[in-house]
Image (cartoon, rainbow, N blue to C red):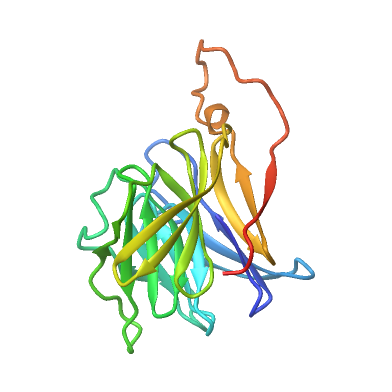
Amino acid sequence: GVFADNRSGTLYACSNNFGGAPGAAAAPANVYAFDLKTGASKGHYPFAVAGSFCNDMATLPDGTLYATDTNNMQVEVLKKGASSLEVWAGADGSLGKKGGVLDGISVLGQRVIVNELAVSKLFSIGIGKDGKAGTPVEITLDRPISHPDGMRSFGRSAVLIVEGGDGGKLEKVTFKGNNGKVELIRQGYTEGPVAVTVVGTMAYVCEGQLSGMMRRPGSTARAPEAKPFTATAVEVGKP
């Protein structure tokens, strides 16, 4: 996951540990921060839990950063001025059991929205006045979504989500309380849409060619054709 925080001029990037020496203890994931204009390093911040997997991130206006930990089905938080992240929500299993896929995350006002790819659900987590997480609540959608992945806030009451199911889609979900209205924007992302970001009135959808990345070493299956990765621009207007 990568997140550009224009307010602070910071680019945040997830760094994960794939594999490692046999028998070695699982190391935590890290978030690296870079100056958005120069690329200069601003530091790096470890997750609180060993074996964590940083998937996606979002920030509050004050610079507080939230990140999904897919392996542990939790949200961790990097408070302003802190040197490491800490567990914020999900330690009680309220966002799903381990083995699920906690994925995209967005901040809308005083709540955090996260999605779970495997079961195609959205959850809302309130941000208390003390910064602590409220009890996660599943969003009731007016129609199903299909394997949500990358997600970004769109105005004050909506998010844009890319979905890997149904041929690959970009959709908008508009919230009213804990209910969500789903609207299709574009369909046909056949190379696995994994991320979306908004610049002006354009959304940019990145496809990950996941079938190639997930191919096991030594597999006898035919390797997918090597081709360039794409980011597709879609006019979405103003929120």
Q: How far across and down, in percent of the image, does residue 237 sit?
A: 64, 63
Vertical placement of residue 191 versus 71, above or below? above
Question: At which x and y percent is residue 157?
Answer: 44, 72
Would residue 148 appear left or right of 32 to someone viewing this image?
left
**For this rendering, which residue is in front, 148 or 127?**
148
Tell me if residue 200 comes above or below residue 144 in the rendering.
below
Q: Quadrant of the N terminus?
A: bottom right
Number of numbered discs on residues: 0
Q: Look at 41% across and 54% down and name the residue there.
A: 182
Left or right of 76? Residue 221 is: right
Report the front residue among 53 and 108: 108
Q: Nearer the viewer, residue 118 or 171?
A: 171
From the top left corner, tell me how far across and down residue 75 is, in percent.
36, 64
Q: Position of residue 121 (x, y in %)?
A: 32, 51
**Quadrant housing residue 227:** top right
Looking at the image, residue 155 lies above or below residue 63: above
| Residue drawn at 46 percent across, 55 percent down | 54
- Does 108 appear above or below 131? above
Q: Nearer the viewer, residue 174 or 133?
A: 174
Instruction: Answer left or right for 77 relative to 196.
Output: left
Which residue is painted at 54% across and 63% down in the image? Answer: 31
> In this view of the protein, can residue 195 be seen by the observer?
yes
> Which residue is painted at 38% across and 59% down in the image?
181
Instruction: State whether residue 48 appears in this view.
Output: no
